[in-house]
């Protein structure tokens, strides 16, 4: 991890918010609950941004994004707008000298993700994709245990995230939100990267609607290991995941990316077949608090990346998403 330029503040950062949709609502409730100072919010509609600000006790609101980014009392912006806008908005915020936490996916190509991290380094600002799964205490524990050999060598990852589509205002088709791989499939792909890294080979199939991928499945081949992943915005797919290795396996119960419980079957016959171990981590708030605290601490400490979801990991996952999508769309 690298250090930001010397003007970084040693105190807790003051937040600005870009986007007032469903996810912003949930994340900002957690940001408020950890005691963060939220100075201002931007939204496209006067009514909606005012309503959002009042509900969350944010003192300033605006429909002028330049005005929010020009504020000297905003150190970091949280961006929660549709995925295809993330690259431009994150770039705008970095160019304005702000630290940035941007919703997943950080960008719609690995090249754009690389450009964003390069820009963040140039301007000496923190940048992270809001991959909250990595900060979930359940995943933190599982990553530590597996790194310490709980499963021996990891040989496979299986994960899927699919829910049936329900029309709602502004979203009359599953294609309206953009690539379902990048929106949902990013969680299974990120999980595979944690335990197996970048695949040697990728094979994928999917369904396009209005030129947008709305469901798909992929096998990531690692030579002596593999990942079987699936995602959908049109139908339900089991929302659990499993990581297997030479000594047994761990099942992450639904919804695996926001998981609160897992079952470990590993080590010996009793634990595998008769008496598996159950791990529980009750949800704290809406589930975003651990990530928001980690980001606030990293920015206050003058960091430019967080080691748990750094530039290298984010770019590698985005590149795998690009490879999967190429297999579906060409
Ligand atoms: N971390 C998580 O748990 C999680 C879960 C689901 C989704 N996400 C991610 O969060 C992001 C936002 O999702 P969402 O469901 O909240 O989206 P959303 O409700 O469709 O939109 C969020 C906000 O973006 C604004 N917006 C729409 N189009 C815009 C544009 N062209 N330029 C600037 N702003 C625009 C909307 O403004 P109006 O109100 O004016 O329409 C709204 O305030 C997505 O990238 C998604 O992948 C994260």
Image (cartoon, rainbow, N blue to C red):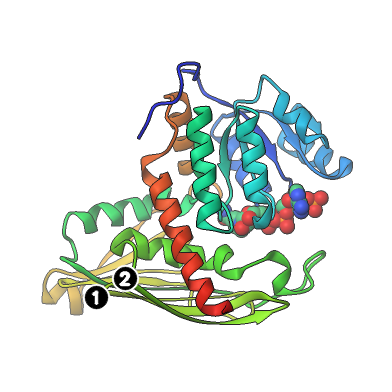
* Left or right: residue 10 compared with residue 270: right
Gap in angstroms between the C-alphas marked 2 and 1:
7 Å
- Label 1 residue near ligand 1, CB within 8 Å: no
**Residue 306: image location, x then y, percent:** 41, 39
Question: 230 and 282: which one is in front?
Answer: 230
* Left or right: residue 280 compared with residue 218: left
- Mark linked to residue 137: none
Q: Which residue is mark 2?
A: 200
* Left or right: residue 58 compared with residue 283: right
Q: Are marks 2 and 1 in contact (CB under 8 Å)?
A: yes
Instruction: Residue lying at the far left in this picture: please name it.
Output: 268
Crowding at mark 1 (Cα within 10 Å: few <14, some 14-19, many 20+): few
The N terminus - image quarter: top left
Q: Is residue 163 above or below residue 92?
A: below
User: From where the camera sits, is residue 53 visible?
Assistant: yes
**Quarter-of-image position of residue 98:** top right
Q: Secondary structure at mark 2?
A: loop
**Residue 187: image location, x then y, percent:** 47, 63
Q: Is residue 86 above or below residue 305?
A: below
Q: Which residue is mark 1?
A: 223
Which residue is pictured at 32% across the width and 61% down the height?
197
- Label 2 residue near ligand 1, CB within 8 Å: no
Which residue is pictured at 58% across the width and 77% down the height?
329
Q: Is residue 323 above or below residue 70?
A: below
Q: Secondary structure at mark 1?
A: loop
**Residue 155: image location, x then y, percent:** 23, 73
User: From where the camera sits, is residue 282 visible?
Assistant: no
């Amino acid at each position: 991890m690298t250090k930001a330029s010397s003007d970084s503040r040693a105190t807790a950062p003051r937040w600005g918010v870009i986007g007032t949709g469903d996810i912003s609502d949930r994340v900002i409730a957690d940001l408020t609950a950890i005691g963060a100072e939220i100075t201002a919010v931007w939204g496209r509609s006067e009514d909606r941004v005012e309503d959002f600000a009042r509900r969350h006790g944010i003192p300033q609101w605006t429909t002028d994004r330049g005005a929010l980014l020009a504020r000297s009392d905003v150190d970091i912006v949280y961006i929660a707008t549709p995925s295809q806008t993330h690259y431009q908005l994150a770039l705008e915020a970095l160019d304005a000298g702000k630290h940035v936490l941007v919703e997943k996916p950080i960008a719609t190509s690995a090249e754009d993700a690389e450009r964003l991290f390069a820009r963040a380094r140039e301007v000496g600002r923190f940048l992270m994709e809001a991959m909250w799964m990595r900060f979930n205490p359940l995943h933190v524990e599982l990553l530590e245990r597996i790194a310490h050999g709980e499963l021996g060598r990891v040989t496979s990852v299986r994960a899927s995230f699919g829910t049936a589509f329900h029309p709602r205002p502004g979203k009359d088709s599953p294609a309206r939100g953009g690539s379902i791989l990048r929106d949902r499939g990013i969680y299974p792909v990120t999980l595979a990267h944690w335990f197996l890294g970048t695949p040697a080979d990728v094979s994928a199939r999917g369904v396009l609607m209005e030129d947008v991928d709305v469901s798909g499945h992929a096998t990531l081949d690692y030579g002596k290991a593999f990942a079987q992943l699936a995602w959908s915005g049109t139908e339900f797919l089991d929302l659990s995941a499993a990581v297997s290795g030479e000594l047994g396996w761990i099942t992450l119960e639904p919804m695996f990316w926001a998981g609160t419980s897992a079952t470990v079957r590993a080590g010996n016959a009793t634990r595998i077949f008769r008496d598996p171990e159950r791990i529980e981590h009750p949800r704290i708030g809406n589930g975003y608090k651990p990530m928001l605290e980690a980001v606030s601490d990293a920015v206050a400490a003058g960091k430019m990346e967080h080691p748990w979801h750094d530039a290298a990991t984010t770019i590698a996952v985005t590149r795998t998403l690009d490879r999967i999508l190429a297999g579906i769309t060409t």
